[in-house]
């Protein structure tokens, strides 16, 4: 193939990415209150749900938003407990983790039924079918169910890594295939130096000067669909907060760092066939909080540009980067109003949305 033909193919393949932009679909804007969106899921291209709470003074009102037309219109559905996260198995069936338990829906969040005796506190669930699932949370807690959440049992392997359970947590579950999966977490004891235990908001400048210290990251790994799990730990800077796998054998891992670190976040590419990983992106100011790999191999990084050295304190401008080769990252046009300290992505087929903890939902349009 000639150089001219190669250049033309490269130009054509880049056109769809250049034409894409993130357009506002929902913006909470009411006086004397604000909305925090904790999670967003689109089980199908038309049906979606966002969960979080409305802050009125010191009061938090649990709430959710549902759509049946791809996000063109949203309506509020009240929930009874503070939502943490969502997981959907198909268009209808999903679970919501709250501050006091686990709820199930068979109507894409239009109605919820609380499961009986469920483990608390937990922060996330993951199901590989309607019967088999896991719940993860603080104090080295990992629970497994084989009857759809009616009964739960503790996963013994979760207690094996070293570290005080009081300062340990499992926070993420991901499966690359029905057999291959992982659960990740960390152990991070509190600082003991005088003055360093003060909250960030009380002394932002001191927080920015704190040295980043290594701590334990936990991994539980299964190759037989969760029948057996193998535990490991390693001392690392930052926390591995999310891992995504694509069907072609690629994956992405997200490491987030504290305020004193040189990098806000780091993305590493995983080959889950071999277990090898390499760093593909990191930045001083761009705090990545979610990511995605499309079936064709296009990767997306979403987060905010921190306005100062102390991250997660003041909302920053939302930024989304895209790459076809995990090397060259391009910034996508995002509605200028989009801001927050955390961003979450939701994907259904070829459609993508993002939500911010500032009460905004945007869709990727061409």
Image (spheres, grey):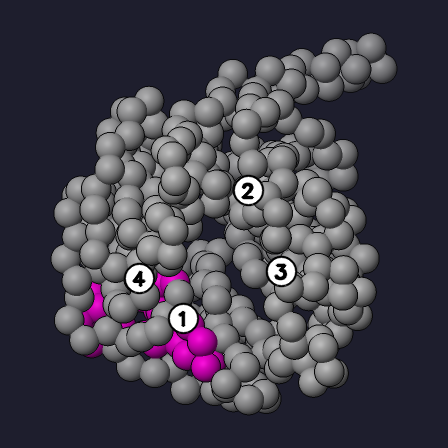
> Which span of residues is magenta-colored?
124-151
Q: Position of residue 262 (x, y in %)?
A: 81, 57
Q: Quadrant of the N terminus?
A: top right
Compute the Cα span from label 2 to label 3: 16 Å
Residue at image mark 3: 201
Residue 136 part of the magenta segment? yes
Mark 3 crowdedness (10 Å alpha carbons): few <14, some 14-19, many ≥20: few
Would you say the residues marked 1 and 4 are in contact, meaning their CB atoms lie under 8 Å apart? no
Residue at image mark 2: 340
Would you say the residues marked 4 and 3 are in contact, meaning their CB atoms lie under 8 Å apart? no
Residue 232 vs residue 174: left or right?
Answer: right
Q: Is residue 34 above or below residue 222?
A: above
Residue 150 part of the magenta segment? yes
Residue at image mark 4: 98
Q: Please, what secondary structure does the residue beneath circle 4 have? A: strand
Would you say the residues marked 1 and 3 are in contact, meaning their CB atoms lie under 8 Å apart? no
Q: Please, what secondary structure does the residue beneath circle 3 have? A: loop
Q: Is residue 277 visible?
A: no
């Amino acid at each position: 193939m000639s150089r001219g033909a190669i250049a033309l193919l490269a130009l054509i393949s880049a056109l769809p990415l250049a034409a894409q932009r993130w357009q506002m679909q929902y913006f909470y804007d009411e006086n004397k209150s604000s909305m925090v969106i904790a999670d967003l899921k689109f089980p199908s291209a038309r049906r979606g749900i966002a969960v979080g709470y409305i802050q009125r003074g010191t009061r938090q009102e649990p709430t959710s938003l549902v759509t049946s037309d791809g996000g063109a219109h949203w309506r509020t559905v009240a929930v009874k407990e503070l939502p943490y996260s969502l997981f959907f198995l198909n268009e209808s069936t999903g679970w919501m983790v709250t501050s006091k338990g686990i709820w199930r829906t068979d109507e894409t969040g239009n109605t919820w039924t609380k499961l009986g005796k469920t483990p608390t506190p937990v922060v996330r669930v993951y199901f590989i079918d309607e019967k088999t699932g896991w719940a993860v949370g603080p104090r080295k807690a990992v629970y497994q169910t084989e009857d759809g959440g009616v009964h739960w049992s503790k996963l013994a392997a979760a207690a094996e890594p070293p570290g005080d359970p009081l300062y340990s947590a499992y926070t993420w579950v991901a499966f690359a295939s029905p057999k291959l999966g992982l659960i990740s977490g960390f152990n991070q004891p509190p600082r003991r130096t005088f003055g360093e235990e003060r909250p960030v908001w009380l002394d932002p400048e001191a927080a920015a000067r704190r040295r980043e210290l290594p701590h334990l990251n936990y991994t539980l790994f299964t190759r037989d669909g969760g029948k057996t799990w193998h535990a490991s730990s390693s001392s690392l800077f930052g926390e591995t907060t999310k891992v995504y796998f694509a069907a072609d054998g690629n994956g992405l891992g997200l490491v987030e760092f504290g305020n004193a670190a040189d990098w806000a976040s780091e993305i590493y590419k995983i080959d889950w066939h071999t277990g090898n990983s390499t760093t593909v992106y990191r930045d001083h100011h761009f705090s990545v909080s979610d990511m995605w790999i499309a079936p064709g191999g296009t990767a997306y990084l979403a987060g905010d540009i921190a306005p100062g050295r102390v991250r997660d304190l003041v909302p920053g401008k939302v930024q989304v980067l895209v790459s076809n080769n995990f090397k060259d990252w391009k910034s996508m046009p995002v509605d200028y109003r989009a801001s927050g300290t955390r961003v979450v992505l939701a994907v259904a087929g070829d459609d993508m949305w993002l939500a911010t903890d500032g009460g905004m939902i945007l869709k990727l349009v061409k």
